[in-house]
Amino acid sequence: MTVRKRLVPVLAGLVAAAASSLAAAPAGAGVNAGEDVFNFGEAPFLGSTGKLALNGPVVGMAATASGKGYWLLARDGGVFGFGDAVFHGSTGALKLNQPVVGLAADPQDRGYWFVAADGGVFAFDVPFLGSMGARPLNQPVVGMAPSKTGQGYWLVARDGGIFAFGDAAFAGSTGAIRLNQPIVGMAADPDGAGYWFVAADGGVFAFDAPFAGSATGKLTGDDKVTGMAAHPSGQGYWLVTARGTVFAFGPAEAHGDAAGTARYIAGVTAHPGGKGYWMAARRALTRPPDARLSGAADSIRASQGSSCWQPGPSAALCADVFEFPADASILNVRRGEVVTVRFDAADPPIAARVLRYDAPATEAGSVRELTPSDAVTFTADYPVGLHRIALSTGWAQGSSSYLFRLNVR
């Protein structure tokens, strides 16, 4: 295959021209209730961690070359093999500096690698060819892909920065480009020449690999893309969203989706035959993420407000989760003091942002998106009086909202 080196910024208008299709199979087809793996098309279900008590959620999946096995990777580095996927080792018993974010199987079927958010690479029965573990990064690493020979690999960061090791050639990146949404995953072109990566809004960037289309402008609500997988021909790929919607491009066909399952889909893995795929599904959350407000004058007198989330398409749960008396939920600050909104969760949200409101609840402006165990800090420069701060999140199960009262003195 001969292609030119290029960066393809994704435009919504390109989607209509590309050979693409939205998964049209009935929602739930191929979904295995209570399991962490969903299988579609010719991809067989061979088992999952659904009945196991995991120390961390599933974050990645990779298939064996035969298509008769796969590995699941948990955030603590625990590895679980099914079918003919042989266990080669894990970091489940080690204390990691950063959580594990991605898994790559050796194309030669010797073993696997996985990578942590700080760029640290762990190799099991495969060559270790370098990492970014001890180097400063502009953004955390979110995924990896192996070279065709198994003698190299690429790491991709949240800003689209690419780090190439071994015989994995650098073909380009978006590290110097301002993206609309962060990069969430990557896939290697099976011919070994290049790679793709995908942003949370469905934008696809192709480097020495064919651009076959994107999902830009096709996502509904607060849904976001969480991963991609290459078609074995190298002429197409699949994208999957957190809510389980599948987008197929080029010769990649949609064989079903997991929409409506109330499960967070962590990624998609292609069957080597090209006529099916697996999804790695995280456990359903029992409650929304925790959110807290604190300030210099009073660091404890605030608590999260009412939360609502949707565990299924026809059910909604709401709970008042004030932990202190209502009058103590006001955070008292003076003008110019620092206020922090903190967001803590086991799994990443589909979207989260903090909005500042004045007393009549008129939106005054947004701050920025939050990620798990993240915080946004700002100065309380509001007029004297009572104000409100709302944290709104879109979750795989539905939505959560938190309301804080801020008394500026």
Image (cartoon, helix red, strand yellow):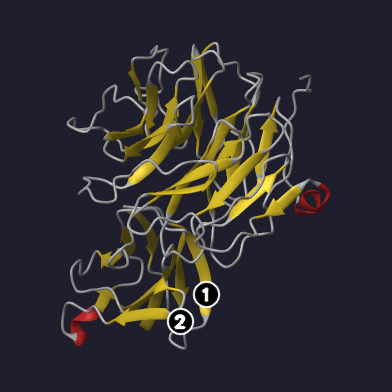
Q: Nearer the viewer, residue 74 or 277?
A: 277
Q: Residue at x 54, y 13 (%)?
A: 149
Name which of mark 1 and mark 2 comes first in the sequence: 2
Residue type pointed to by label 1: Ala
Callout 2 secondary element:
loop
Q: In the displayed structure, would residue 114 be above or below residue 40? A: above
In the figure, residue 275 lies in which quadrant?
top right
Is residue 384 visible from the viewing direction of this image?
no
Q: Quadrant of the N terminus?
A: top right
User: Residue 38 versus residue 403: which sits nearer the camera?
Assistant: 38
377 lies above or below 162:
below
Q: Is residue 257 left or right of residue 266?
A: right
Looking at the picture, how far across and down is residue 255, in whole percent? 60, 50
Q: Which residue type carries mark 2?
A: Asp
Horizontal side of residue 131 vs 54, given as left or right: right
Instruction: Name the residue that disc number 2 marks.
Output: 358
What percent of the width, then of the height, locates residue 294? 26, 66
Q: Is residue 164 visible?
A: yes
Q: Report if the CB atoms under discs 1 and 2 are less than 8 Å apart.
A: yes
At 49% from the left and 54% from the top, the residue drawn is 30
Task: Tell me where residue 322 appears, x and y as whole percent.
Answer: 22, 79
Q: Which residue is mark 1?
A: 364
Percent across and percent down for residue 409 are 30, 79
